[in-house]
Amino acid sequence: MAMSFMMGLNFLLLVAMVATNLLSLYHLSSTTSFFHPTTPPQSTHVPHHLLQQLQTIRATINHLTRLQPSDKNPQPSNSINAPPSDLLTYAKFSPIASSCHDYPDLLHQYMNYTPFSLCPKDTHLAESLILRGCHPLPRRRCFSRTPSNPRLSSPDSNVIWSSYPSATCRSFKCLNPKLGFDLNLDSNQFLAYKSEVDLTIPQLLDISKKGNSVIRLGVDIGGGTGSFAAKMKERNVTILTTTMNLGAPYSEFNALRGVLSLHAPLQQRLPLFDGVVDLVRCGHAVNRWIPKVVMEFLLFDVDRVLRGGGYLWIDHFFGKGVDLDKVYKPLIDKLGYKIVKWATGNKKDSSGMKNGEVYLTALLQKPKSR
């Protein structure tokens, strides 16, 4: 394996040398003419695509050089510590910067599998990498583990509970209903108006109707178990929910409700085309714990996928009261959206009282034209 690695490295070095020489010849031939010595040389811009190719080759060589084994007695290819072949394919030969390279041990574990067989049981590795910025994950050629006999009449049968080793619960019945693990859609969530920081679904749809703006498709960022999507589904509105299975079967619960979830962290670019959704909701997952720069990129990605006239609903965002006007309002104002609703209220739980936190609920409408 080490010999093939060195042969591949030497081949890339040869390609880089040839490419560099060709680029130099191209540049010289475009600035000097042998048959017209009296003509003054003219500066010619090197084509951008040639520079890109050269930079790609150089980046690849630099990456391979860093990964070159230092010991002079390489282990045989069947060694337990030898990197899997798929890890070499998907991680080492990509010249594009990736956070995956910052966690080689985790990536090695994730890609250490037997091709064409069952995938490893350590499903938490995928989320560990995703949450560290390694997304999208490399593809693998193994078969994912799925429930053997899933039935709608038995919700628990739709989950491989052994995939959540840290959880003591092995049924939806013992999961906290306050986190949304309740298949009963008769609850008043998103329907009851209790304070100024509440915005109900009927109010939202009424505002949209009065503004001659139809809501047909939306995204719920950090939507957990998909409660909002399930409620909107009853009103013929399709909502995609971004969620993570942090110790509990959030994605499986979305599926049981018949709504689609996207297994994606908050820092990931939304896998949607520009200007295709009518509504984006940001729930409790979007809060003051998100770094300011990450929050700014998140808001501008929301703007990217929203159509002109679409709505951004910031639902019960919480942060320190002193930061609301100094940090978050200027951040939101950068979007240039029309403020339809802007309401704040004290966060009255123990954390809110201790840290001086407040809730913000805002409904903002994107301009129809820039």
Image (tube, rainbow, N blue to C red):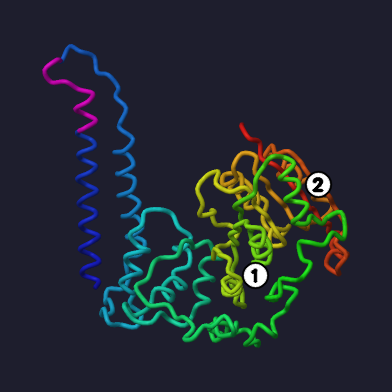
Report the front residue among 207 and 261: 207
Query: In the displayed structure, would residue 353 be above or below residue 43?
Result: below
Instruction: Estimate how packed mark 1 is, as few (under 14), some (14 to 19) or many (20 or more) residues with alpha carbons within 10 Å.
Output: many
Q: Quadrant of the C terminus?
A: top right
Residue 101: give x, y in percent of width and height: 44, 63
Residue 165: give x, y in percent of width and height: 57, 85
Query: In the displayed structure, would residue 182 be above or below residue 148?
Result: above
Report the front residue among 1 and 311: 311
Residue 107 relative to residue 89: left or right: right
Residue 182 relative to residue 243: left or right: right
Residue 30 belongs to magenta span: yes
Residue 352: give x, y in percent of width and height: 84, 64
Q: Which residue is mark 2?
A: 342
How far is the residue under mark 1 from the one under mark 2? 26 Å
Q: Which residue is mark 1?
A: 225
> Where does the magenta region start and end?
26-36
Residue 280 belongs to magenta span: no
Type of amino acid at the residue the image marks with label 2: Trp
Element at label 2: strand
Report the front residue among 193 and 320: 193
